[in-house]
Amino acid sequence: MTKHKIYIMSFASVYPHYITKTERKGRTKTEVDEIIRWLTGYSQEELEAQLEKQTDFEIFFAEAPQLNPSTALIKGVVCGVRVEDIEEPTMQEIHYLDKLIDELAKAKALEKILRK
């Protein structure tokens, strides 16, 4: 079976788009990084190392220290797909991140985005 092309896409190539999308709505790179760290368990240094290595999405999530246990609370639709219904784990993790970035861009409070 052929892998979806997002799996082999460099996380670093998409990361600037996350920043741009949220900055246009008055949010910050720091908030984007906080969301990524919350979701994946990476430290800021580890996140920056992954970006520098041009790691693809599949490896980025496979090497994540620990997916946040509260990811089960992430619900909703991204690109017409309900994130909670996605069966393939890596694709679901990618959609979780997309959903969190969308919430940040829609001016949702960071505490709510991080399911506190």
Image (spheres, rainbow, N blue to C red):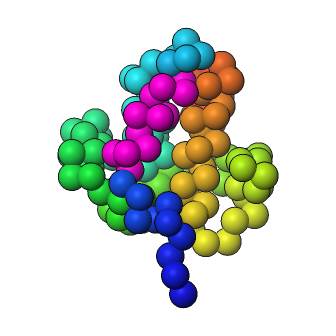
Quarter of the view holding residue 88: bottom right
Q: Is residue 48 magenta?
A: no
Position of residue 112 relative to residue 39, above or below, is: above
Using the rendered image of the protein, determine whether residue 31 is visible from the camera's viewpoint: no
Prevailing secondary structure of the magenta residues: helix
Quarter of the image for the N terminus: give it: bottom right
- Please report the residue visible at 50 percent of the width from the left and 61 percent of the height from the top: 6
**6, 86: nearer the viewer:** 6
Left or right of 8, for residue 111: right
**Magenta residues, as a range?**
11-22
- Give residue 28's position: percent from left, percent from top: 45, 18
Position of residue 108 relative to residue 5, above or below, is: above
Left or right of 113, for residue 3: left
Position of residue 101 relative to residue 6, above or below, is: above
- Please report the residue visible at 48 percent of the width from the left and 25 percent of the height from the top: 20
Position of residue 88 relative to residue 19, above or below, is: below
**107, 23: nearer the viewer:** 23
Quarter of the view holding residue 33: top left
Using the rendered image of the protein, determine whether residue 87 is visible from the camera's viewpoint: yes
**84, 13: nearer the viewer:** 13
The residue positioned farthest toward the top in the image shown: 26
